[in-house]
Amino acid sequence: MGRWYGRASFDPRRIIAQILVIQAAFYCVSLALFVTLDSATGRDISLDQFFSYTAVDLDADGSLVCIAVFLLTAAACGCLLLPVVGRARKCLDFSATTYFIHLWPCVFHRGLPYNWEWWALNAASVVVMSVVGEQLCMRRELAEISLPHHTEEMQGLTSRSGRR
């Protein structure tokens, strides 16, 4: 049916493709930001920055870089929700899915995160990604639909039908 209204057909392949695109963008944006900020601060990039909950500990050296990267990545991926997902009501689902999938490499890398900073940062990142995506999608969904004003054509139609 229509793009915005009506019944949406359930297409698992499309949903999986959307999840993969967002997940790949999540890691690519994170990598680009880590490389940029680490080179600016003179730090070496490591997998711990991506997947270790200890990198987000507020007492750890360089944790502010990780916090900044995660929040900026969430904002960038929120912008990506507009072209990939396109619906405001789906933004929270895709945002939560992105960070839920990210949880698993973190668990396999260092075990289940136990510090509150990691959980708070990821919860805040889900909120940022979702809100940015929802705002962009709602702006497009609520945009005025311009209808052509063909008064001459409309008058022609009404005269043919016998109405004046």
Image (tube, rainbow, N blue to C red):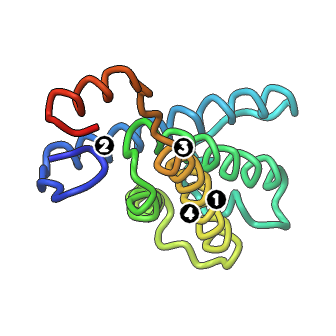
In the image shown, does 25 or 161 lie closer to the viewer? 161
Residue at 79 percent across and 55 percent down: it is: 63
Quadrant of the snapshot with the C terminus: top left
Nearest the camera: 57 or 159? 159
Return the disc, 3 or 1, that comes first in the chain's sequence.
Answer: 3
> Counting other residues with Cα less than 10 Å from the Cα at mark 2, is it few (<14), some (14-19), or many (20 or more)?
some
Q: Amino acid at mark 3?
A: Cys
Mark linked to residue 156: none
Task: Work out how far the residue at label 3 is from the one at label 1, CA to CA, in angstroms.
Answer: 9 Å
Image-quadrant location for residue 127: bottom right
Q: Residue 135 is drawn in which quadrant?
A: bottom right
Specify which label sits upstream in the sequence, 2 or 4. Answer: 2
Tags 3 and 1 touching, CB below 8 Å:
no
C-alpha gap between disc 3 and disc 4: 10 Å
Mark 3 vs mark 4: which is more N-terminal? 3
Q: Position of residue 50 (x, y in %)?
A: 58, 48
Is residue 14 visible from the viewing direction of this image? yes
Residue ID for mark 3: 77
Q: What residue sits 31% from the left and 41% below the top?
A: 20
Label 2, secondary structure: give it.
Answer: helix
Which percent across, then down, holds residue 99? 47, 60
Where residue 126 is drawn, which disc sits there?
Answer: 4
